[in-house]
C-alpha cells in the first residue's frame, strides 16, 4: 500500500511508547493521525507536541476494552476526516499476575484479555467494515509480541496467551480480507528485536476498578528502570530497540504489504525453529526447559 498525503491513520495506545512513535512517523509521511489512548493528560500532551510539529491530529480518549467506546472513537475519526486508511490496534497492558498459573487471580486474565484481545477485535469491528466500504486501499496492523506471539513466556503467561491470540486473530483477518478480495491488508507486529522502553511496565496505573486485584500483591510492582538495574547487577546487559525503529518497520511493512512485521533476530529465529521442530516431531517442549528449571 502506498502511503501519501491526505490519508488517515488511526493509532490506539498513542499517548506514549510505540503508539506515539507510529503516530509521529505517519505524520511525517503526510498522513492525518487519529490518536486514541485511555490516559487523557498524556494524550493531550502528545497531540499538542505533534500539532506543534505541523501534524494534522485528532485526539480522543478511548477504552479499547469497551466496544461502545471504540465505536464512538471510530465515529469521531470518520466525522472529522471522512475516511481511515491505516488502523493500528496497538493498545496493550501487562496483567500484573504473580506466581504459578493456578495462583493467578481471574481478574488478571479478564483485564489482559479485555485490552489485548477484545481491544483488537473491537478495533477491527468498528473500523474494518467502513474501510472496506470506502473501496480504497487500507491496512490493519495488530501489535503482538515475541513473548507469546512467537514462543510462550511462562513467567508472564497471561500476557503471552493474549499476544498469541492476537497472532491467530490477525491470521484469520488476513484470510477473511483475501476471501473478500479486499484492497485492505493486514499485518501482525512484533516490536523488537530487543527490549523497548514503553509504559507497559506500569500498566497497573490504568487498571480499572472492575478488574481490580482482589488481594494484595506479594511483591511490589517493578519499573523498567528497576528491572534493568537488577539485570545489570546480575551481570546482564540489556539491549533496547528505539521505538522509532519499530515505527519505521511498520511503515516499511505497510508499503511492502508484509504480513509478518518481524524484525530480523537470530534469537527469535531459534525460538521459532525450536517450537516448530517440537511440534513436527511430536516431542515434549524442551525449549521451555530454561523456564521449567527456573
Image (cartoon, rainbow, N blue to C red):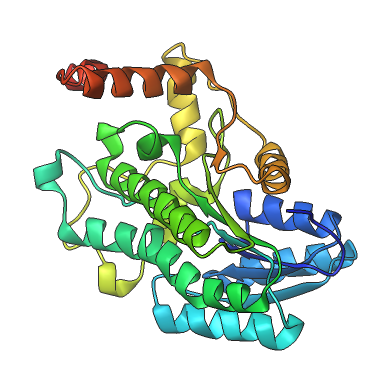
Residue 25 makes an appearance in the image = yes
Q: Residue furthest top?
A: 235
Q: Residue furthest bottom?
A: 79
128 vs 200: above or below: below
All told, the count of numbered labels is 0
Q: Position of residue 112 (x, y in %)?
A: 32, 57
The image quarter containing residue 131 is bottom right
Residue at 75% across / 81% down in the picture? 81
* Front residue of this view, candidates 95 and 217: 95
Quadrant the C terminus occupies: top left
228 vs 44: above or below: above
**Is 14 on the left-hand or right-hand side of 98?**
right
Q: Position of residue 27 (x, y in %)?
A: 81, 59
**Is 182 on the left-hand or right-hand side of 232?**
right
* Front residue of this view, candidates 219 and 245: 245
Residue at 43% across / 24% down in the picture? 230
* Front residue of this view, candidates 196 and 164: 164
Residue 93 makes an appearance in the image = no
235 vs 231: above or below: above
**Is 257 on the left-hand or right-hand side of 189?**
right
Q: Residue furthest left?
A: 102
* Front residue of this view, candidates 231 and 270: 270
Residue at 44% across / 31% down in the picture? 227
Q: Position of residue 203 (x, y in %)?
A: 43, 55
Residue at 49% across / 26% down in the picture? 229
Q: Residue furthest right?
A: 54
Q: Position of residue 20 (x, y in %)?
A: 67, 55
Amino acid at each position: 500500500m502506498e502511503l501519501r498525503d491526505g490519508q488517515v491513520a488511526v493509532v490506539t495506545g498513542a499517548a506514549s511508547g510505540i503508539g506515539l512513535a507510529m503516530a509521529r512517523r505517519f505524520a511525517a509521511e503526510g498522513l492525518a493521525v487519529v490518536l486514541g489512548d485511555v490516559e487523557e493528560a498524556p494524550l493531550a500532551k502528545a497531540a499538542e507536541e505533534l500539532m506543534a510539529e505541523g501534524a494534522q491530529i485528532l485526539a480522543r480518549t478511548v477504552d479499547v476494552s469497551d466496544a461502545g467506546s471504540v465505536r464512538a472513537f471510530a465515529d469521531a475519526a470518520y466525522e472529522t476526516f471522512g475516511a481511515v486508511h491505516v488502523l493500528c490496534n496497538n493498545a496493550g497492558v501487562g496483567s500484573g499476575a504473580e506466581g504459578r498459573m493456578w495462583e493467578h487471580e481471574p481478574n488478571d486474565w479478564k483485564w489482559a484479555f479485555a485490552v489485548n484481545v477484545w481491544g483488537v477485535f473491537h478495533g477491527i469491528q468498528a473500523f474494518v467494515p467502513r474501510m472496506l466500504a470506502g473501496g480504497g486501499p487500507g491496512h490493519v496492523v495488530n501489535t503482538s509480541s515475541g513473548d507469546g506471539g512467537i514462543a510462550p513466556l511462562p513467567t508472564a503467561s497471561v500476557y503471552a496467551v493474549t499476544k498469541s491470540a492476537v497472532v491467530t486473530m490477525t491470521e484469520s483477518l488476513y484470510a477473511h480480507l483475501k476471501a473478500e478480495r479486499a484492497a485492505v491488508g493486514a499485518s501482525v507486529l512484533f516490536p523488537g528485536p530487543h527490549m523497548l522502553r514503553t509504559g507497559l511496565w506500569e500498566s497497573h496505573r490504568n487498571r480499572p476498578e472492575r478488574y481490580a486485584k482482589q488481594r494484595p500483591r506479594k511483591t511490589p510492582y517493578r519499573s523498567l528502570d528497576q528491572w534493568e538495574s537488577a539485570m545489570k547487577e546480575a551481570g546482564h546487559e540489556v539491549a533496547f530497540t528505539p521505538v522509532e525503529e519499530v515505527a519505521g518497520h511498520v511503515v516499511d511493512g505497510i508499503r511492502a504489504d508484509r504480513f509478518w512485521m518481524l524484525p530480523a533476530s537470530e534469537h527469535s529465529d531459534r525460538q521459532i525453529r525450536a517450537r516448530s521442530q517440537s511440534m513436527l516431531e511430536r516431542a515434549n517442549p524442551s525449549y521451555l526447559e530454561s523456564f521449567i528449571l527456573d
